[in-house]
Each structure stands twice: as structure tokens, then as C-alpha cells.
């Protein structure tokens, strides 16, 4: 066989992740969930932990993530993923347990569970999808909705004196002693997607190494409920959303 | 050491540990605080996990997480806390996960008070949370039963993959009595192929209660109903005391049944033909006991239902006798407990 710069020409250098089922998703065109699912699947494959994974799907657009991932997975009630995850990890410390939660799930209805699991320093991996809106229910205001952003329940745009400010839950969690790693990443460009993958990998590695509570916040596009074409939605993350939610390592 | 002196709350906790419970999550509320305290002291030594949760919601969802790994798990609380847990109980029922929930009832509605009560009967037996489901409900009447019913509760929940409620009250929870650990019921091991343990060597398992496809949820619910039909047929439990020749049969459960039994003894001593049916399973309600006593005799029975509530179980008694006998009610609410004297004078009025 011919060899080109050390690689066998027949070597497969890119393939569908084993942890991701080969099916099409129900997500809207331009949605970030598909990318985030794939990043997680790739990381799990690369770390060789697929058979030890127990995943917790949220209530939200990603509720049927178990139809796309190919490892053990359960649903949690809205907001309760980190309470469910706490018990699983305490009873089965040898498994790798992660939650996948949206902004409404993690930072509104589940704020209590989030803060306390973090404060207990549970050795868990949290993938937090921030798209500044409730997608599944039809585009209502999320805790992370930006000031001025129009949603189904803020028809004139979010106003500070009525709806308060975008909640920066990652910055709130970071000072807690139990929290070991917090990074905010984005899916708005290929470069950012690669950075996101690196952060997701770190958050899983931390659990493997028993380092403790690790959270990756992913700014993710929702073209449907932002009322933008997919490309414009990516630009909106870069130009608007990332100003309110700065990217980078928080802890 | 086979004899122990314990409160009902401690007896239930000890019973749970001996039944193989490996995770307890709870949140403080009176009158069940001895329960988590006992678990905090003894669960780690038993190789299990104790977590004081930040809320009742978190506690029941920790139980959900534990249950889906296939381990035996439980929580306990009292009335207002049990209301908060209803979301999680509905999800447990929907996902068909086994778990045990203890309700040491206190006065309600609202914050109510911390006196014993039986006013969560509707909530316990009719579902409690949203959706088409039931919990199995066991009602101990002694500290001994508080202990030994725990293994039964875990066995039933594993057997049917359904949450089981143990319904007791503040009086029985706080009261101390001797118990004999030799009377622990046998703990049965159930294989749990459905549990999430990591997919090594098998296809991934999924635990869910969401079914969006056309007709999918109805199919799931009808399957759950089939399970309930078996439970209704096989799991009715009750105690009968001097019912054979009784004209008036008292109906009471838990603490109230003990007081009713004393009243029966006193009335029998005076030659009155009085008996007692004590439902042990509140769901399934022991309809069979009523059928037997209503149909077998030519005599016209009266059932006097006695509750520490304004009248909840009495509705199930009415359904059970289905118009074939008279049903009377005596109850007190908000921490009031019908006394032996009140029962006796009510019976005397009925006899007259």
C-alpha cells in the first residue's frame, strides 16, 4: 500500500462517533444542539468512556437526546437533573455522569438544584446550553434573555425594571468552593466549536480524575426564536450575546 | 440483640436499612426529624448514602436518580413536604421506578400544625401528583409494623416497579415501643435489567416518562393499568377483629385503628356485637374484606369509619359496600384524635 506522510492511505481519519446514533435529529435548521450533541459524543469516544456513561437529558428541546446518543441515558423532571445526577454519582462513583441542560432548566426552575449540587462539590460534568430563550415551549423569555431581546413573553423586549437582568449563572457558580472548573464557549464559528470541544473534554477529564464539579456553558444559536436566519444567528452570538456573556475560562 | 426500644420514625429507618435501602435523601420537617437523623447516623456504616437535600424537590429527585441505578432508595417527610414531592412521585410512577416514600402525617391544609393527622389519605391513595397512576400505600399501626413494613414496601416497589408510600402519622412516628427484629419481613432480590449502570456488554438503557408518538403514551398507561389490576387482585391486606357476628364494624387504619380496637374490646365486654376492619393496604383498598362481611351475612351491617380527618377513607368504604350497607363516619381534624369515649358514645347512638 502507498503511504503518505506516515499515514496509511486506507486509514480512516474521520468517522461518525460511536456515541452518536446515525439518525437525523428533530432540531430546527441552524440549531446548536446537534453540534453540542456531537461534541459530547466525540469527546466520550476519544476518552473511551462510552460504556461507563450515565447521561441526564433535560426538559427542553433536548429532552429526547437519548434518541441521538448511544449510551445509558435518562430524563429528569424540569430543573432537577443535578439532583438526579447527584444520587447516581454517589451510588456509582465508577460511572461518568453528566447533565445536559438548557438555560431555563439549569438557571430558572432548577437554580436551587444547580447551586446546591455545585456547592456540595459533586463530581459531575454539566453541559449548559445557553440560547437565551425557551425553545421547546415556543420562544419565551429565559433567565439569560438579553435586555431588549424580543420573546413571546417580552413582546417589547426584555426590560430591566420589569424582568430583571440576564442571569450569569456561571459567574454566580464560579466562586463556590465546590466548583472546580467553569468555562464559557460558543458555537458561532468553526474555531469556537473547536474551543468548545476542548472545554467539554476538560470537563469530562475532571470527572475521570475526581477533580469535581465542572461546568461548560455553551452559547448556542436558536435561529427560530431569535427570528434570524442561521448565519445571522451565529453573528448575533459573536456581536451581541458574547458581549453580555464573555467567552473564556471563568474558573 | 433482637429487642429494641425505638420510636416509629427510627423503627422505619432501621427497617429500611435492613431491607437493603442504599440511599436516603430528605429535608427536615416535624414530626419526622428522627428519621433523617437516624439515617445520617447509621446509613454510612451500612454502606449506603445519606444526603440532606436542599429541598423536598431535590430529595425526591435524588431518590429518582438512585432508583434508576437499580439501588433501593427512599425519602421521608411530613404532609407539606410530601405535597412538594408529588412531582417526583409522578415521574417515578411514569418511569416505572421503584422507590419508597414515608409520610408521617401532620395537620393540614397549608402549614397546618405538627399534630398527628390522617388527612393526606386522598393524596396518598388517589395518585397525588399529575397523571393516571397510583402508589401502593401501606399503613402500619405499631412501631413493630413500622419496622417490618419497610422491607415489604421495598419488595412491593421492586416487584411492581412502582413507588410505594408508607402512610403513618406524627403520633406513631414519635411514640416509642419495643420491637422484635426477628419479625423483619423477608427481603427479596429482584433482577433489574432495566437499570442504568453504563452500557458495557449490552445495548444502552433509557429511563423515560415522555412518549410523544401517536398513541404511545396511551399504550404505556394501559400497560401500567394492567399492573394495577394485578395489584388490586393480589395485594389487598387488612386485619379483621371480631367481625364474624358484628352488627357494627368499625373501620380505621394506623393509629386510629388502635384506639378503635380498644373501643371494640370495651364494647364487647358489655356484650355489644362490634368488630373492626383495619385496612393495611390503603391502595389497593381491601374491598375484599367488605365484600365478605357485607354479602355473607343476612344481617344488615353498619360500617362506622373513624379517621383523624374530616372524612376521606370513608369514601372508599362507601365504594366498597356499594350501597349494600349503611356507612357512618366519625372524625376529627387539625390534630384532633377521636377518643375511645367518643367512639363508644357514637356506637351507642347507632345501636339505639
Image: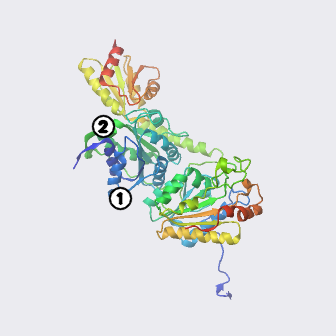
Q: Nearer the viewer, residue A149 or B105?
A: A149
Label disc, if present, on residue B47 of the rendered structure: 1
Residue B344: quadrant of the picture: top left
Local crowd size for mark 2, using a 10 Å CA cut-off: few (<14), some (14–19), many (≥20): many
Please provide percent x and percent y for residue A48. Answer: 54, 71
Local crowd size for mark 1, using a 10 Å CA cut-off: few (<14), some (14–19), many (≥20): some
**Chain where mark 2 sits:** B
Q: Secondary structure at mark 2?
A: loop
Q: Quadrant of the C terminus of chain B?
A: top left
Residue located at (68% from left, 58% from top): A25
Please provide percent x and percent y for residue A134. Answer: 66, 52
Q: Nearer the viewer, residue B107 or A29?
A: B107
What is the C-alpha distance between the residues marked 2 and 1?
Answer: 28 Å
**Chain where mark 1 sits:** B
Q: Is residue B196 visible?
A: no
The answer to whether mark 2 and mark 1 are in CB contact below 8 A is no
Please provide percent x and percent y for residue B24. Answer: 40, 51
Residue B333: quadrant of the picture: top left
Q: Secondary structure at mark 1?
A: loop
Please provide percent x and percent y for residue A127. Answer: 58, 62
Label disc, if present, on residue B142 of the rendered structure: 2
- Residue B81 higher or lower than B189, as above or below: above
Amino acid at each position: 500500500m502507498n503511504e503518505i506522510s506516515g499515514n496509511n492511505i486506507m486509514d480512516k481519519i474521520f468517522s461518525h462517533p460511536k456515541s452518536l446514533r446515525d439518525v437525523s435529529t428533530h432540531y430546527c435548521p441552524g440549531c446548536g444542539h446537534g453540534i453540542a450533541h456531537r461534541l459530547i459524543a466525540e469527546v466520550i469516544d476519544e476518552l473511551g468512556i462510552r460504556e461507563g456513561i450515565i447521561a441526564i437529558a433535560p426538559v427542553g428541546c433536548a429532552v429526547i437526546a437519548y434518541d441521538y446518543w448511544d449510551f445509558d441515558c435518562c430524563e429528569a423532571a424540569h430543573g432537577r437533573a443535578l439532583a438526579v445526577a447527584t444520587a447516581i454519582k454517589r451510588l456509582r462513583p465508577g460511572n461518568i455522569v453528566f447533565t445536559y441542560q438548557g438555560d431555563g432548566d439549569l438557571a430558572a426552575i432548577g437554580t436551587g438544584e444547580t447551586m446546591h449540587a455545585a456547592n456540595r462539590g459533586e463530581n459531575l460534568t454539566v453541559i449548559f446550553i445557553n440560547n437565551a430563550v425557551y425553545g421547546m415551549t415556543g420562544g419565551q423569555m429565559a433567565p439569560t434573555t438579553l435586555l431588549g431581546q424580543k420573546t413571546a413573553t417580552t413582546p417589547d423586549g426584555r426590560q430591566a425594571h420589569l424582568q430583571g437582568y440576564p442571569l450569569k449563572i456561571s459567574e454566580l457558580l464560579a466562586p463556590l468552593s465546590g466548583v472546580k472548573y467553569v468555562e464559557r464557549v460558543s458555537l458561532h464559528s468553526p474555531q469556537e466549536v473547536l474551543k468548545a470541544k476542548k472545554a467539554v473534554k476538560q470537563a469530562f477529564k475532571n470527572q475521570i480524575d475526581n477533580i469535581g464539579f465542572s461546568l461548560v456553558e455553551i452559547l448556542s444559536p436558536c435561529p427560530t426564536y431569535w427570528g434570524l436566519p442561521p448565519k445571522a444567528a451565529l453573528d448575533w452570538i459573536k456581536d451581541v450575546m458574547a458581549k453580555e456573556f464573555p467567552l473564556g475560562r471563568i474558573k | 440483640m433482637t429487642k429494641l426500644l425505638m420510636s416509629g420514625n427510627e423503627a422505619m429507618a432501621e427497617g429500611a436499612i435492613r431491607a437493603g435501602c442504599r440511599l436516603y435523601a430528605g429535608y427536615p420537617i416535624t414530626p419526622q426529624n428522627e428519621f433523617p437523623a437516624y439515617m445520617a447516623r447509621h446509613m454510612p456504616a451500612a454502606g449506603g448514602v445519606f444526603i440532606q437535600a436542599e429541598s423536598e424537590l431535590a430529595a425526591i429527585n435524588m431518590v429518582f436518580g438512585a432508583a434508576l441505578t437499580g439501588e433501593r432508595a427512599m425519602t421521608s417527610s411530613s404532609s407539606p413536604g410530601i405535597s412538594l414531592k408529588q412531582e417526583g412521585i409522578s415521574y417515578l410512577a411514569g418511569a416505572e421506578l421503584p422507590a419508597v416514600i414515608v409520610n408521617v402525617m401532620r395537620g393540614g391544609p397549608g402549614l397546618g400544625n405538627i399534630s398527628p393527622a390522617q388527612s393526606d389519605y386522598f393524596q396518598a391513595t388517589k395518585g397525588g401528583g399529575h397523571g393516571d397512576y397510583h402508589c401502593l400505600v401501606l399503613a402500619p399501626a405499631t412501631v413493630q409494623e413500622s419496622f417490618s413494613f419497610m422491607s415489604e414496601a421495598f419488595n412491593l416497589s421492586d416487584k411492581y416497579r412502582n413507588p410505594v408510600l408508607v402512610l403513618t402519622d406524627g403520633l406513631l412516628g414519635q411514640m416509642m415501643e419495643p420491637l422484635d427484629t426477628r419479625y423483619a419481613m423477608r427481603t427479596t432480590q429482584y433482577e433489574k435489567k432495566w437499570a442504568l449502570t453504563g452500557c458495557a456488554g449490552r445495548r444502552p438503557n433509557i429511563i423515560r416518562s415522555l412518549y410523544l408518538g401517536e398513541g404511545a403514551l396511551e399504550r404505556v398507561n394501559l400497560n401500567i393499568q394492567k399492573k394495577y389490576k394485578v395489584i388490586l387482585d393480589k395485594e389487598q391486606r387488612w386485619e379483621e377483629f371480631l367481625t364474624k357476628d358484628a352488627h357494627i364494624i368499625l373501620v380505621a387504619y394506623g393509629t386510629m385503628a388502635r384506639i378503635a380496637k380498644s373501643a371494640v374490646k370495651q364494647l364487647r365486654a358489655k356484650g355489644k356485637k362490634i368488630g373492626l376492619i383495619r385496612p393495611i393496604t390503603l391502595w389497593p383498598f381491601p374491598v375484599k374484606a367488605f365484600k365478605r362481611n357485607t354479602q355473607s351475612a343476612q344481617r344488615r351491617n353498619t360500617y362506622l369509619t373513624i379517621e383523624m380527618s374530616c372524612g376521606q377513607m370513608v369514601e372508599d368504604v362507601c365504594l366498597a359496600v356499594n350501597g349494600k350497607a349503611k356507612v357512618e363516619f366519625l372524625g376529627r381534624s387539625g390534630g384532633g384524635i377521636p377518643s375511645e369515649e367518643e367512639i363508644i358514645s357514637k356506637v351507642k347512638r347507632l345501636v339505639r
